Image: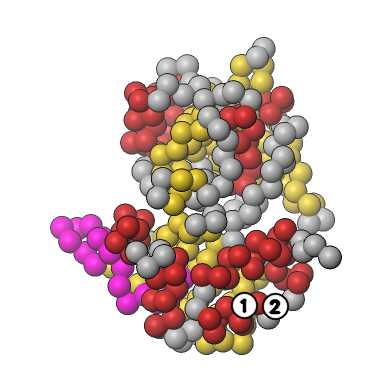
Amino acid sequence: MEKDKDILRYEEAVTILPVRLRRAALAVTEEEKKTAEELRLRAGRPMTVLLPQGERELDAVVEPEELETLCDLATEFSRYAAAETLREGFLPVRGGFRVGLCGTAVMKDGANTNLKNLSSAAIRIGRQYLGIARDLVPQLMREGRFWNTLLLSAPGGGKTTLLRDLVRCLSRQGQRVALIDERGEVAVMVRGEPQMDVGPRTDIVDGCPKALAIPMVLRAMNPQIIAADEITLREDLKAMSLAVGCGVGLLATIHAGSVGELLEKPLYRQLLEDRVFRLAICIRCQGGERTYEVEELP
């Protein structure tokens, strides 16, 4: 019998664990493999698996040297090549995974240059669900033109997964999309190659703040749509307003459970007043299933 794709995804993720921890991670149930979101490692503490209902301890206490081994495996024994993201506290991994790291920051001239004495790690089991955005794309078009759209949900609600598939669908339909992947979670770039399917006409800037990357792609890539994950800073909003003034479409995510909750956040109120975004896709979870509802913004 063919294995479930989510189980296979989990089993692929655990291959970057040291052997002893890998055995413990593979000992979880098939149902837990299907729904696992992260594996979390903390030196001197039991490794845990993050499930929808919370973290569950596994039968393996993490040794400090195992965190170093994990880092070596994730970088394919080339930490130097991953130095740019390592100093930001994460590693993109071939296959579309992401490892978040904590440890002692190595500071120079007020900036972190590296992490040493690793103390904890979180292996994010990124999953892509191809086609979940297919029926949404036509609803985002008005008279043949893409309307600027926000993706809304509470944290962990599936915004990044939906954003990835929307980018893929728009790109496959012929739109030139510039993806600003500041945290490396959408495309998961490894040495210039996206590990996730974000479409054939998508140009990616990763590891760069949105406020810097948006003017960059406007000058260099002539995009029709700019997509970005998690707008959080006022500088991000200013850069997006600049893009709108250049006639470029926008697709972005924000932490908000509803349009009403969005309206209560002062940072975003000006965005709505200036009509920078016209539509919202509200993501809701009902009975373990996610639903997507397109709404016009006030």
Residue at (65%, 14%) from the top-left corner?
144
In screen coordinates, is 290 left or right of 186? right
Secondary structure of the residue carrying numbered label 2: loop
In screen coordinates, is 77 left or right of 267? left
**Residue 35 appears anywhere in the view:** no
Residue at (50%, 78%) from the top-left corner?
18
Residue at (49%, 50%) from the top-left corner?
188
Residue at (45%, 38%) from the top-left corner?
204
Quarter of image, res 46: bottom right
In screen coordinates, is 243 left or right of 60? left
List the single residue furthest toward the front: 1
Secondary structure of the residue carrying numbered label 1: helix
**Residue 96 appears anywhere in the view:** yes
Q: Quadrant of the C terminus?
A: top right
Verify whether residue 58 appears in magenta.
no
Verify whether residue 110 appears in magenta.
yes
- Mark 1 touching mark 2, by CB under 8 A? yes
Task: Measure the alpha-carbon separation of dots 1 and 2.
Answer: 6 Å
Q: Give amino acid for label 2.
A: Val
Rate crowding at label 2 as few (under 14), some (14 to 19) or many (20 or more) other CA atoms within 10 Å.
Answer: some
Could you tell me residue 208's position as x and y percent? 36, 43
Quarter of image, res 130: top right
State which region is magenta: 106-121
Could you tell me residue 289's position as x and y percent? 78, 52
In the image, residue 151 above or below residue 143: below
Could you tell me residue 57's position as x and y percent? 62, 81
Disc assigned to residue 25 = 1
Rate crowding at label 1 as few (under 14), some (14 to 19) or many (20 or more) other CA atoms within 10 Å.
Answer: many
Q: Give amino acid for label 1.
A: Ala
Disc assigned to residue 28 = 2
Could you tell me residue 1's position as x and y percent? 84, 65
